[in-house]
Each structure stands twice: as structure tokens, then as C-alpha cells.
Image (tube, rainbow, N blue to C red):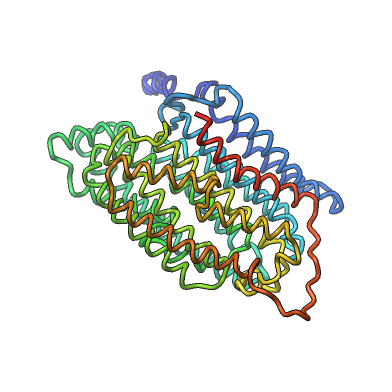
Amino acid sequence: MIPFLADIDPVFKVLAPRPADWLSILPEIAVAGLSLICLLQAMFLPKALRSLIPITARVGLVLVAIMALTNGPWVQPTDVASFAGLLRQNLPTDGVRMVFLLSALLTSFLAEGFLRERDAAVADYHHVLLVVTAAFMLLAQSNHFVPFFLSLETAAVGLYVLVGYLRRSEASLEAGVKYLVAGGLSSALLLMGIVLVYGALGSVGVADSLNFTQIGKALAAQSVANTVSPLTLTGIALILGGVAFKLGAFPFHTWIPDVYQGAPTPTTAFLGTASKAAGAFTLVLLATGPFAPIAVKLAPLLGVTAVLTLLFGNLGALATTDVKRTLSLSGVSHAGFILAAVTAALVLPGANALGYDVEQVIVIYLLAYVIGTFLTAQALVSLPAIEDHRRPQLALRGLLRRSPLLASALGFGIGSLAGVPPSVGFIAKLLVLMLLVSAKLWWILGAALLGVAISIHYYFSILREAVVRPTDADEELAPLEIPFGTRFLIGALTAASIIGGLFVLFGR
């Protein structure tokens, strides 16, 4: 027994986490701890003081975001591995960490009043929201399939809860079941792909065929010798299929309209931003990392998927008149833009637009998408509705008369999503188009431009109902009272939608 322990001791000393490793994920630890604090407050605070729970969550998220923006061992300008190679950090992973924190913060603002109106527990929602956020933050830093899969599934289980959170709403419960079934299928695809890659590469002598770095080296050697096995390629295809589900890319997008429509609107906004950001950055992480040696095979696959995602997303949104359903399908088209950027990176390694590399462009695109989505969602949540899952465009008529502020929020949000200059959404789409031009992917560029032209129609049909279409002259429209917090949030996001684009252009 003693010789056995003697053999284990040196290995343990190499693999055991160091203090620097724990410091590198201090923001993630802080968010997880914040979720526990919210849960303890729900257990021990009297009912009259439970309104402090969302405030605690928001203050904590702001403090974590400030910490994540300051220089420290948790911010890495270059690639740094931690936890014996399980995690990897660099500047883009720090950027996508901010996407998750911002999405969670804005979701908290949307959810508090929304849940109170429907007599749903606010504390439990924030606890789950913070757990999902911490899991997504770890997912973006994964350099090994074990933390990758555990983070992804932790986030997925939390999202199942958030989608079906309104227990008195049949639509919410139905959406939760649909998401559970579709999510289980994607997890099965992903896990089967990981097992195939693990077995195929492990059988040829790769020491740890779950480690991204070692997978990349093995694929590079096999690609040069033209010995990449069909089993490995099948595993990679299944992994990318599971990731495409999270991203909402064709043909794994069919669950999105029903789930996004039935889910509570704050959850819909979080799904459309944080979950899509997780899928997008995971795709970048895998395609430009361990799977980069087979870029010649991946680029055509991702390129065709990008074109089909752009077309199916935009054409689907064109055919619906429900606002939540329209925005969910437009999110599919945004996934097409992200796929196009990744394809450009595979065709032309080192491609950049205005000095931004592909990972930075995707972070900028995701931030722009967060701003546009939450501005639009804030306008929807502030409108009275008998059923949250029914948001027809006709219900927007008279919004300008009832609340010019909400109409402005809807206008700036839709403008950013549509890519109207000088919004940050326009700059983000322009950067992706520049990547396609530099990689000479003219066929994807044509599909992207066609998608933008189609999207203008359905985006502005929403604005037309809210701003242009008149109401009956004798119809009484009571003005909407907007709380100060909502006014401040709309003002901040509106300013970000304008100033953000200028900062991206001139901030280099």
C-alpha cells in the first residue's frame, strides 16, 4: 500500500490545484457564492425583506463585473492554462465572461417586476440564474471535455428550470418539457461524439484524448499523414451537432420558436443571449482550437450551415406575426452570422477586421446582440399582457402615444438587431462582413446581405405597428407608468447602442 501511495504522491503534486489556479476563476467562484447567499436570504429573511434578494444579486453581479474588468490574476492577456490544463484563459474568454455577467444582470432587472406580477418566487429564480451564469463562465474557459461537459450540463439543467418557471402557465410548462426533450437529445449527441473522439484517439496512443491541446496535436499529426479515422470525424461531427443546438443553428433550430415563445420573457432574453453566447464561443473554442487541423473539412460544412441558418432564420421570421416568435427566429439568423465568422477564421487563419481578430469580433457581436435583445425585451415586459406567451404585433399599436420612452427602447433595440447605422449592431455586422471579404467567401457574403435585406422587413414591421399604424380616434389609451429603474436601464442601454459602435470603431 505504501509504494502505491508513493507513486500517487508525485502525480498529485503535479495535478493538485495551486492558489494561482483558484485566483484565476475568482469571478466564477464569486458568482457561485452569490447564488448561495441569495438562497440563504430566501431561507432566513422575513417575507417583508425578501425584496432585498434581487438587489443583492444585482449589486453582487456589478461588483464581480468590476473585478473582472480590473487587472488581476483572473484577467489574462495571453493564453494561460490552469488546473493542470483543464481550463484556459485569454483576453477573449475574459470578454465573453462579461457577456454572461451583463446578460444575468439585465435579466435580473427584467425578472423582478415580471415575476411579482405573476406571484412567482423571485429568490429561487435569481439563485438558478446565478448558478447558470457561473457555469457558462466556466464553460468558456474549458480546455478539456470533462469541465466542458459538466459546465454545459449544469447550465442546461438550470435553463430547464427557468424555461418552465411559471408553474401556473401551461405555455411555460410545455416549453420547459420541449426544451428538456430537445436538450436531452443534444446532450446525447455531444456525449456520444466525445466518447468516439476519446476512443479513436486514445487507441492510437494519445495520453489524454479529452484534453483539447492533446487532441489538436494528434489531429495535426494525423492530418499531415492523412490518417484521420472516420470514427474521429464522426465524433467531431456529433460534437459540433450538440454545439449547434446550443447556438440555435440549422438544422438544430426547430425547438427555438416554441421554447422562446412559451418561456417567461426574461428567460427568453437570457436564453437568446447567454445561451447563444455559450454556443458561439464553444464553437470558436473547438473549431479554432483542437479541431483546427481539419479546417479543410470543417470549413465547407460550417459554411453551408451558415448559409442555411441565415436563410431559414430570416424566412421563418418573415412568416410570423408574434413578436417573441419573430425575435426567436431572428436569433437563428444571428447564429448564421456567428457561423460565418467562424468559417472565415478556418478559411483564413489570422483573419481580422479593423484590427479585431475573429474571437474579438464574436465577443463584440454578442455584446451588440445583448444590448438589442434586452432593449426590445424591456419594452415587451413593460407592456401589460394577459398571457406572456402571446405577444402579437397588433398589441403594440399606440405604444408611442402611451409611452414614448418604451417606443424609443423598442426602436433602438430593433435598430441594433437589424444593423441600422450607427448602432453597435451595425458595426458588429460590418465586422463580420469584412471578415468574409478578407476570406473571399463571396457566397456566404451574398447570403448574409440577403438575410440583412429580409430582416429589415420583419424588424420594421414591428416598429410600424408601435409607431406608424394609427389607433382608433375614439380609443382611450392610458399612459404607461415607467419606474425610475426601468427609465435608467433604457437610457443606459440606448446610450450603449450608440456609443458602443463608435467605441468599437475608434477605440483601437
The percent coordinates of residue 272 (x first, y second) are 53, 55
Task: Please tell me which residue is depicted at 17% across the width and 45% down the height of the picture.
Answer: 229
Q: Nearer the viewer, residue 288 or 410?
A: 410
**Residue 155 at least partly seen:** no
**Relative to 260, is 27 above or below?**
above
Name the side, left or right, on which 394 lies relative to 44.
left
Q: Nearer the viewer, residue 37 or 14?
A: 37
Name the quadrant containing residue 200: top left
Name the quadrant containing residue 292: top left
Q: Quadrant of the N terminus?
A: top left
The percent coordinates of residue 128 (x first, y second) are 63, 50
Task: Please tell me which residue is depicted at 37% across the width and 55% down the height of the picture.
Answer: 448
Name the quadrant containing residue 267: bottom right
Q: Nearer the viewer, residue 197 or 448?
A: 448
Name the side, left or right, on which 299 lies relative to 156.
left
Q: Nearer the viewer, residue 238 or 395?
A: 395
**Residue 45 at least partly seen:** yes
**Relative to 288, is 263 above or below?**
below
